[in-house]
Amino acid sequence: MSVTVLAANRVTLRGLRLAVCKGLNHLCHTSLQSKRSHSLRPHQAFHERKVWITSASGNPQTAQASATENMSNTYQHEMQAACAAVRLAARLCTKVQLQLKAGEKQDKSDDSPVTIADYGSQALVAYGLQSSLPSMQFSMVAEEDSADLRSQDSQAMADRITDEVNSILCQEDGAPQLTKQAVLDLIDQGASQGGPQGRHWVLDPIDGTRGFVGLRQYAICLGLLDQGQVVLGVLGCPNLPQQPIQEEDGAAGVAERVGTEGIGCLFTAIKGQGAFVGALNGGPPSSRLQLQDTSDFSQARFMESYESKHSDQSFTSKLAKELGVTAPPLRLDSQAKYGALARGDAAILLRFPHKGYREKIWDHAAGVIIVQEAGAVSTDASGAPLELGQSRWLDIDRGIVTATPKVHAAILKAISKNSQD
């Protein structure tokens, strides 16, 4: 689909626009630097986190070599494009989250909210991927569409989304300024049905929109399907600390820390090439993640959705008790949970949606490949693999279980026992 752009007709106008943008960037940078620095927690021992962070050579140390330098050419360009697109979207989301007003979100038919940042993030990812990979046939399965924004009553919201998208693009060398029609068209490029043939990007522009609105955790989640298999995943988590998470990191108000030292993570994985983590606003993620398996559940922690409407917390509590897990759960919005588990912040991730809810592939594609490449197993409650490459929907048996192999096997046994009771 062609994208209409509004380009400057004179060099002087373009120069003026760039000068204004640079001035705005300087003001934003100065504002962020003036925030109080977030004090990092004492570093937690790796053996307590049940994870090694290693170099690509396998030596247990904090890796400094770029992950990109150590992977084969397979999907390397796609990974670079995906990281750049997610970072572009994250800049818009972090700006909007603290400024969101009551009239800048809508409620969809399933009672889930959608904000100007959801739409703007989707437009920027679509723009970024196509700009970086112009020769790749573009197909994207994404959560949002512009139908509501095209109504007369929503023109003010559509204008604001366009302004926010252009405020980010004007910071990119050579990027055009987009018309409102162009932004709406970019949003609608997420209408692919996916499926087992060809390549399809899979995007959740803001996973955890309720968390986003509540100033909690959220994630920009981008995966790539190739012939029905997830081969690449990127999670941008602007509010996630770079140190192991604590209970308070899932609570309201964590958005206030954005831009401070030690906040903001980017998780990446390519099938067969490992999982990595780095700073959201840094270079290519370079710290390789490798989980250690265990059979000791006494100190294990499990993660689940922050809101009880997203998962049956009474059932997951019952499973934890059956396994002998005594620590309280870590409750977090979004696929940031997958990233946190991949680096060993918890041992188990459980999601048991209430009856009648049907999962979508964008809620899991990016996160699942990251935990799998870190050494975890992710299946439905019966142990069947997650079929993420069939359509826009993910059909499962009861729930989703993610853990290292021994822990995963024990959970499936506990599910079977409790399902029979």
Image (cartoon, rainbow, N blue to C red):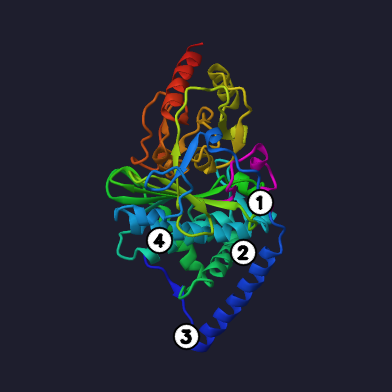
The quadrant the N terminus occupies is: bottom left
Instruction: Give the residue pinned by disc 1.
Output: 255
Q: Nearer the viewer, mark 3 or mark 1?
A: 1
Q: Helix, strand, or loop for circle 3?
A: loop
Instruction: Give the residue pinned by disc 2.
Output: 156
Badge 2: few (under 14), some or many (20 or more) residues near its Cα, within 10 Å? few
Q: Helix, strand, or loop for circle 2?
A: helix
Instruction: Give the residue pinned by disc 4.
Output: 129
Q: Earlier in the sequence, mark 2 or mark 1?
A: 2
Instruction: Give the residue pinned by disc 3.
Output: 9
Dots 1, 4 in contact, CB < 8 A? no
The range drawn in magenta is 236-257
Between 130 and 354, which is closer to the camera in this rendering?
Answer: 130
Q: Residue at x 43, y 63 (%)?
A: 128
Q: Helix, strand, or loop for circle 1?
A: helix
Q: Is residue 151 visible?
A: no
